[in-house]
Amino acid sequence: MENLQKILNVAQIRKADEHTITKKGITSFALMGQASLAFVKAIEPFLNRSLKIAVVSGVGNNGGDGFAIARILRSKKYTVQPFLVQLKDTLSPDCDINFQKLDNTISIKTTSEVPEFSEYDVIIDAVFGSGLSKPITGFAKKVVENINLAKKTVYAVDVPSGLYCDVLSDSETMVQADLVISFQRPKRSFFFPENGNYVKNWKTVDIGLDEDFIQLQESNYYILNEQITDILKPRPRQSHKGSYGHALLIAGSYGKMGAAVLSSKACLRSGIGLLTTYVPKCGYQIIQSSVPEAMCLIDENEEFVTQLPEFFKYDILAIGPGLDVNEKTTLVVKKLLSENNKPLVIDADAINIIAKNEELKLLLPKNSILTPHIKEFDRLVGKSDTSTERFQKQLNFSKEYECVVVLKNAYTTISSPEGNLYFNTSGNQGMATGGSGDVLTGIITGLLAQNYPPLHAALLGVFFHGKAGDEAACNKGYNALIASDIIDALRIEKS
């Protein structure tokens, strides 16, 4: 997806810095100034001049950013106390220039000199930057601990001190940042679930790096954001329901018909032309009354699906929400995988059935879309000790079975058969509620039926699902949000 931004590693970002300096004919000090101004602009909406601000800086370029930020804030009449965490006698050249431009800086050289920071309202963390690759020790560790113990609002410059950018950190000594202002791109580690306490929120700012150069770098990691809307197709005035596909959704069982309802409603909201939902007998009246826009076919069994309906006339098939994993339903899944060669959308219990029957993986139609949550994915491929191990298994699965995997989590990741991983940026914690995944399955199914390529359908579906969740949270809050709210807020169109 060329229109989506790549996530670079530390070495590549450093190379982008150097390229920009050479191409634009500016100095590294000038680039540091641009970054510092961008940081201040990003946090200033949250500040007022009654606040006492501590800026805690190290001796490297991240510290140089910190000193420049302190100087800019002072020039704007904020009350600022700069600190130097003096890990060595010499500062990096650009850091030293900015340090010399400040007065009344407090130097910290020993553990006994580390303040508690409790007298400050805001702490700006600029101790260690993106180049850190080993645990923080000595009195610097005490600095980080005291920043966290102060329980104040913390803004981190580029990365929270102690956090590794490309891999999981091997220490828990990291600044717990309320907001990280990252330069040009988020770091890959921002998306790791293990880092949720250290990167509570993040925002990127443009510091003037050469975007064309960045996008030419080799990377298999992408940011899924508003840019994905560029691939939305127009809906011509002269079109009809037959123009937007007909999907068959096989879903539901006794006690879990809600999943079929939610998935059906979301599918219809996605812009599909026609939807037929296949359910057990117990679901007939439920679907007909709850989703009158959908057609309904019923299985001969009262409580769960035992037969595979004639499916060849449908453009797209989806299976799984609320399905159940009994023996007869397992045979339905096996029969579908054996007889169908079109891409499928596979969710929930259909994934659990495949996980229990290893041979079914080999029958997955190419370019199918699987939408597991973490526990379902672990059943499919085996447990992982870390998120990075799970991401690698996700990529491996997509490559081996030539399918798209949508791994649902706080930052949902989408893997492609080509070996790319996309990190979604829409959505919120209110969406951690029953039925949210069924809604996503419906949205993706509807988009696939409209003839979007499978990867595009997955990316668009995930992004707009999260965006609808964000809109719903604005109206309902996080605690009160339910899956139906996501459907009601769904708008699949360019902003």
Image (spheres, rainbow, N blue to C red):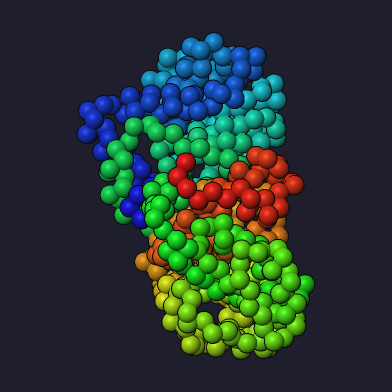
> Is there any visible trace of residue 113 in the rendered image?
no
* Quadrant including the N terminus: bottom left
352 or 202: which is nearer to us? 352
Percent x, y for residue 242?
A: 45, 66
Q: Is residue 231 left or right of residue 74?
A: left
Q: Is residue 243 visible?
A: yes
Q: State the residue at coordinates (69%, 69%).
A: 287
Q: Residue at x 27, y 35 (%)?
A: 20
* Front one among 141 and 129: 129
| Relative to 269, residue 84 above or below | above
The reply, left or right, for residue 413 in relation to residue 8 is right
Answer with the quarter of the image where residue 32 lies.
top left
Residue at 31% in and 45% down: 214
Q: Nearer the viewer, residue 378 or 388?
A: 378
Counting labels gives 0
Q: Is residue 423 above or below residue 149?
A: below
Query: Image point 56% across, 68% down: which residue?
Result: 275
Q: Position of residue 439 (x, y in %)?
A: 61, 60
